[in-house]
């Protein structure tokens, strides 16, 4: 079959916590302070050999490049938001790294970025021609070296270095020597380093030695390195802020056979951050929101209906737990406390949640039956604040909801004396197991008397929509009487 690569992980890897390295080689995992350290000799990394079937697996080259390029694109998207850094130049070499760059550019296009391609030495093979055609079908511009500005900072926000991979040896030849110089000579008109394009290197910074790194000391110093399959030894010399591992495709049999100490990939992600966490200037963290305007003439006159619309938007956006809300309460000591709870129902009568009546929040509500709720939907740049009085829901309502919960949650509500001090986790787990055994026959689990619901009856609503330059929209609803009828007054508040 055309394009089939016998991809062999003939890799000598040792757990850095169990064995010493041979020939006094540096254990780079320690130097990077990795949680999951592993090392390998580059000449053993990928080879085509005759070997027992169980130590290699078969992939199409197209498969490998698709996975690699997707890993690079997802790593970029995790760090650099398209709303802030949208213009991406992928500089692609003639080999596999160049193909990875082409695939990454295609995915970045679909992620909402504006990719450009510089591909001066095209590989005349069907696979690479196909990648070019895919990008051209998306109207992604291809730029010659001559078309590029001398200072790449003028036109691009992210520079993807996909020129050379781990098999590169020697000195870069034209035009790549010039392209590498341009990556080294980025300047910002106002000398602000934060305005410079971010350099993202695929697997190995171009021009580096695969084991020794930047031998001359004058090579590319990327802001991000996306190692593929496993980091190469040169990664110990990487000093940028963001180091990711990509290539989520190694079968468990290979991991077990070679005792690979690979980190777990989170959720469905194709990349995982490794190395030291980035150093962040907390005072510089900010988001320049881009949102539709929230205008008085466009919102519903009834805040309950407006909340329903926004809640439906949060559901449609696929947000995780859109019903999570921060509940703030204050007792007689006037010391506020906050925690997140889950909204379990709302209508014109109010917002309902359930809890233990012996908890701290319950004690505070008994002393001061007023509270505040806050919903925050990050992906929509929205917040909703609700303030009002609090009362218990009826026993029948609590009973009905309790028996709608999973049996495990019902048992947990009985087992946990919420907010009380316990001697250890094992005590709670043992109590849960005892109750689980007690109700193992499938009999109905009685709702404990100390458990039930609360309803906040709103007196004030505020709808917040994030906008650029901190000029956020804030619309407050407060009730008033007109001709004996309760209506809601809408005021705009300064952000």
Image: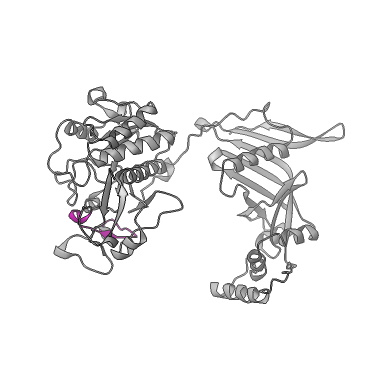
Q: Is residue 129 magenta?
A: no
In this rendering, would 172 be left or right of 493? Answer: left
Locate residue 334, reporting x and y percent.
66, 55
Locate residue 255, reporting x and y percent.
33, 61
Residue drawn at (30%, 60%) of the image: 37
Relative to 5, residue 463 above or below: above
Residue drawn at (80%, 57%) of the image: 394
Q: Is residue 41 magenta?
A: yes
Nearer to me, 386 or 184: 184
Farthest residue to the front: give it.
Answer: 1
Relative to 414, residue 353 above or below: above
Residue drawn at (54%, 74%) of the image: 426
Nearer to me, 192 or 164: 164
Q: Which residues are magenta?
A: 31-45
In this rendering, would 486 be left or right of 48? Answer: right
Res. 368 visible in picture: no
């Amino acid at each position: 079959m055309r394009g089939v690569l016998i991809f062999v992980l003939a890799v000598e890897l040792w757990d850095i916590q169990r064995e010493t390295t041979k020939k006094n080689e540096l254990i780079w995992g320690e130097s990077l302070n990795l949680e999951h350290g592993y090392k390998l000799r580059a000449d053993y990394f990928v080879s085509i050999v005759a070997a027992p079937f169980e130590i290699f697996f078969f992939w199409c080259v197209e498969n490998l490049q698709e996975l690699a390029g997707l890993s690079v694109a997802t790593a970029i998207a995790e760090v650099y938001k398209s709303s802030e850094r949208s213009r991406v130049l992928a500089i692609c070499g003639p080999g596999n790294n160049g193909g990875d760059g082409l695939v990454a550019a295609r995915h970045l296009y679909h992620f909402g970025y504006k990719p450009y391609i510089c591909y001066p030495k095209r590989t005349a093979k069907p696979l690479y021609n196909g990648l070019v055609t895919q990008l051209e079908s998306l109207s992604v511009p291809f730029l010659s070296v001559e078309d590029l500005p001398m200072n790449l900072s003028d036109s691009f926000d992210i520079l993807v270095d996909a020129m050379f991979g781990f098999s590169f040896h020697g000195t870069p030849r034209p035009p790549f020597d010039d392209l590498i110089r341009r990556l080294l000579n980025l300047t910002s008109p106002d000398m602000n380093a934060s305005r410079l394009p971010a350099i993202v290197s695929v697997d190995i910074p171009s021009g580096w030695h695969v084991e020794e790194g930047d031998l001359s000391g004058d090579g590319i110093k990327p802001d991000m390195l996306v190692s593929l399959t496993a980091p190469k030894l040169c990664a110990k010399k990487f000093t940028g802020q963001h180091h990711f591992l990509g290539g989520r495709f190694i079968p468990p049999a290979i991991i077990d056979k070679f005792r690979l100490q690979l980190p777990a990939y989170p959720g469905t992600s194709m990349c995982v951050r490794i190395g030291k966490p980035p150093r962040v200037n907390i005072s510089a963290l900010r988001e320049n929101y881009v949102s539709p305007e929230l205008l008085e003439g466009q919102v519903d006159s009834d805040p309950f209906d407006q909340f329903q619309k926004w809640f439906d938007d949060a559901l449609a956006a696929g947000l995780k737990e859109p019903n999570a809300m921060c509940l703030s309460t204050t007792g007689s000591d006037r010391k506020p406390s906050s925690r997140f709870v889950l909204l379990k129902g709302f209508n014109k009568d109010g917002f309902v949640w359930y809890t233990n009546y012996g908890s701290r929040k319950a004690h505070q509500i008994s002393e001061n039956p007023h509270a505040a709720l806050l919903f925050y939907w990050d992906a929509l740049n929205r917040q909703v604040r609700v303030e009002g009085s609090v009362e218990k829901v009826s026993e029948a309502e609590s009973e009905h909801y309790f028996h709608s919960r999973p049996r495990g949650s019902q048992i947990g509500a009985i087992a946990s004396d919420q907010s009380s001090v316990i001697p250890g986790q094992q005590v709670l787990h043992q109590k849960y197991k005892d109750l689980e055994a007690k109700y193992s026959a499938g009999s109905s689990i009685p709702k404990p008397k100390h458990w039930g619901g609360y309803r906040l009856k709103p007196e004030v609503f505020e709808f917040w929509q994030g906008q650029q330059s901190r000029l956020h929209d804030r619309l407050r609803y407060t009730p008033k009487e007109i001709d004996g009828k309760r209506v809601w007054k809408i005021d705009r508040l300064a952000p």
